[in-house]
Structures are given as C-alpha cells and as structure tokens.
Amino acid sequence: MSESRQEASTGSVTGPVSWRPESWQTHPAIQQPHYADLDELDLVRQELSSLPPLVTSWEILQLKQLIAEAQQGKRFLLQGGDCAESFADCSSERISNRLKVILQMSLVLVHGLQQPVIRLGRFAGQYAKPRSTPMESRNGVELPSYRGDLVNAPEFTPLSRRPDPNRMLRGHARSALTMNFVRALVDGGFADLHHPEYWDLKWVDASAHAADYRRIVADIAEAVQFMETLIGEPITSFSRVDFYTSHEALLLHYEQALTRQVPRQPGWFNLSTHFPWIGMRTADPDGAHVEYCRGIRNPIGIKVGPSMPIERLLRILEILNPDDEPGRIVLIHRMGMSKIAEALPPLLEAVRATGRRILWCCDPMHGNTETLANGIKTRRFANIVGELEQSVDLHAAAGTHLGGVHLELTGEDVTECMGGARGLGEADLSRAYRSTVDPRLNYEQSIELTLRIVQKLGRSRK
Ligand code: PEP
Ligand code: CO
C-alpha cells in the first residue's frame, strides 16, 4: 500500500493518529440536514455522548474476524432489513417478524451453501436516509425533504419537516429498545425457527420451482432432526453474538456522538452499531463520510454504484484500509439488472489486481428501483433475482467470489415489490404498501429469493 498514506496514519488496525471523531467537520459533508439552532444541536450531541453505547468493541472485533473469514470464502454474509426503520415500527411484532425471516433465511443458506452465515440486520439504527433533492415541492409549497426519522418526520408540514436534533436522542433510544429485544429473543431461543415444518410455506405451491423448493426444505428438516437426535435434545438457541447490526453512517453528528474509546483497546469505535456503511451518494474520498469512517475500527461497508470511477474506489480503499487489515472492508455493489454486466467486471478486475482483502456482496435492490406511471416506487422480483444470478457468474469469471447479499426486506405481508411465486402485479401494490422510502421484499419473497440464491450458488460452487 502507498507509503505516503502509511506515513500519515498508523493504519486502520488501531486507527490513524491525527484523527478525531469530529475531524469530518473540516471536509465537505453532503446529505446533512440544516439545523436551525446550533446550540440545541450541541446540547443534544453532548447528551448523546454521555449515554451508554448500543454495542461493544468486543462484538465489533468479533464481527471483523468473521468478515475476515468470509473474505477467505469460509462464511457467507446475509445483511437485511428495512430500507428505513421508523420510530412507529419499533414494536414487538415488527421486530420479531423481521428477526424470524432473517433467521429462517440464514438457515436455508447454512444448509444450502454448507457454510456458516453471518447474520447482519439493517436495524437498530437505520433511521437516516440520503435523498436526491434537499427540498420537496408539492402544489407550489416547498419544504425540506424527509431524511429519515432520525432527522425529521415524513408528513408534508413545516413542523414535521423541520430537522430536529432531539430526534437523535429518540433514535438512540429506539435503537436501544430494538437491540434489547433482539438480544432477548435470540438468547431465549426461537425454537420453531429450526423447523421448516412450522414455517409459513403455503406460497411454495404457486411457484414454478415448487418441487425444488420442497426438496430443499425437506432436506433442512431432515438435517435438523438428525442433529437433534444426535445431541439428544431440541436445538433451541442461537448464541448471543450470532446477530449483528448495521446502518448507513449518514448523519455524522449522530455517529460522532456515539464514537468512543474503550479501556484496553487502542483507537476509536463507533458503538452505535457493529457495521456502519457508506452509501453510494456519500462514497467520496475527499468527503466527510469517508473521513469519519477512516478513524473508526469497525468493519466498513461501501456501496458501489454503476457510476463509481475505478480510481475513486481505489482511493477510498487506500484511505479506509491502508494496511489491508483482514475483515475491514465489505464492498456492496448495487448496479442494477441492466447495468451489472457492463459495470461490475472492470471494478472486480481493478480491485482484484490490488490484491486487497475484500468481501464482495451484492445488493440487488437499489439498482432496480423503478417508478410506475402512477408514481408508485417498486422493484421487480425477476430483476432482483437476475442481478444476483448475474453477479455470481461475473465474480466466477473474474476470479473473485460473491460472499454475501444485502437485501431490503420485512417479515410482514406487504405488497411493495412485484413478482415472486404469487405473481404480485401493479394492481396489488396499493393493497399493503407501507414503506415510506424504498419497496421491500415481503416474507414470502424473502424466503423465495433465498431459495433461489441457494439454487444458484450451491450449483456454482460444486
Ligand atoms: C440504502 O441502502 O437504503 C441506500 C440508500 O442505498 P445506496 O446508497 O446504495 O443507494
Ligand atoms: Co433503500
């Protein structure tokens, strides 16, 4: 790696010397709200800084180790959850349904890929959203865009749309409530999750792949039964550290306040989440988001879209991981079904040529968002599957490998994405469309997609 960068820092293993949690403030910070009252902002930041963190440095380093193993092809990463959490959805049912679907998906993956799976939720802090325009106009009225519940509220009124720093305190509290419940559920054991015979699989018969799906599910049930016979008791719990959280590190005042030092560990940790990621719009080597992430010891995700110049990506990698530390970098490509064949191979080739340790993940959601004539935002299941399948082949051709997926999903029966076994069409979208931002896979579509991943990856790895 370049000498100049090594001189400028002690490397990501312990964090650069000349960095502070607030260093980002001297870099161009896009996608930040304009708070009207800076004293109020300061008070909130001070209060947040004194509140307990949501995760521990030990868990973060453990996740980094697991990602390092995934970089070697020994584990698979499943990252999923809402596009944006909302304060209103912080309820026991929503949280447990989302956890259930992710755990069921991971069981299908463990079995189908014959590999351990890293379960990484997009939750307990996924409250801030990048927007394409800072202002929104309706009928001649212009107000600040909705930037997620961490910043303002979605209703189109001046009061709701006013960026309110106190929302960061509420976001921290909701994240803590979510985290607390997730930890309790995971610890307490979700016994039926291991038994596909208790899953809701009625939709399978509607699929063209029904026979294949039934066989995979029957195999899982048999394997679980075999294990239980072997150990002589039901498999009841996943271990506590088997579940990790992630969110886009977007609102830097919030991230800064949760960035801490801990006893007996050098450097700084973002203790609001295990895994922060840099969104496509803020992945700028000279920008505030990369500067902020440079100094923390967490593993970092970077979203890579079709317009990312190769040189820019290589610079970001150099800044964020000067010493090529194992487990530090996850590159999440989100090209879109129609662009991936052209956009991905040159990036794979250029990054592979550097010899860097990377975990490659595919986000097949964000390049496949479309707006229908009636203004509804949706995604087609066929495009989501198509991008994933292409990405497996493109990695194989480039000599790299796809080691994870990044999905927007919910455990609820929503109708936001079209297609899947039930063939949801345009007319179905109005029935249960609840997302305030991007359309998510529903429970059935999430399980179906996982079965498709297993079909494709299981085959390509044989
Ligand atoms: C997201 O993950 O919700 C998102 C906004 O993605 P991207 O930065 O890839 O557009
Ligand atoms: Co999204």
Image (spheres, helix red, strand yellow):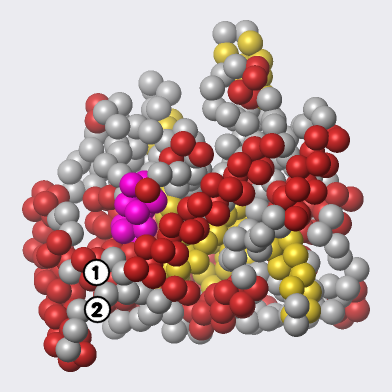
Q: Residue at x 34, y 32 (%)?
A: 433
Magenta residue check for 99: yes
Under circle 1, the secondary element is: helix
Q: In the image, which disc is placed on residue 82?
A: none
Mark 2 → mark 1, Cα distance in angstroms: 7 Å
Residue at mark 2: 235
Magenta residue check for 169: no
Whether residues under marks 2 and 1 lie with C-beta atoms below 8 angstroms apart, the answer is yes
Q: Residue at x 49, y 44 (%)?
A: 85
* Residue 320 left/right relative to 82: right
**Residue 332's quadrant in the figure?**
bottom right
User: 65 or 345: which is nearer to us?
Assistant: 65
Residue lying farthest to the bottom in this orientation: 230
Q: Residues within 10 Å of mark 1 (few under 14, many from 20)?
A: few
Q: Say which amino acid is labelled 1.
A: Ala
Q: Which residues are magenta?
A: 93-102
> Where residue 6 appears, x then y in whole percent?
85, 79
Q: Is residue 309 at least partly visible in the picture?
A: no
Residue at mark 1: 191
User: 251 or 242: which is nearer to us?
Assistant: 242
What secondary structure is the magenta-colored segment mainly? helix
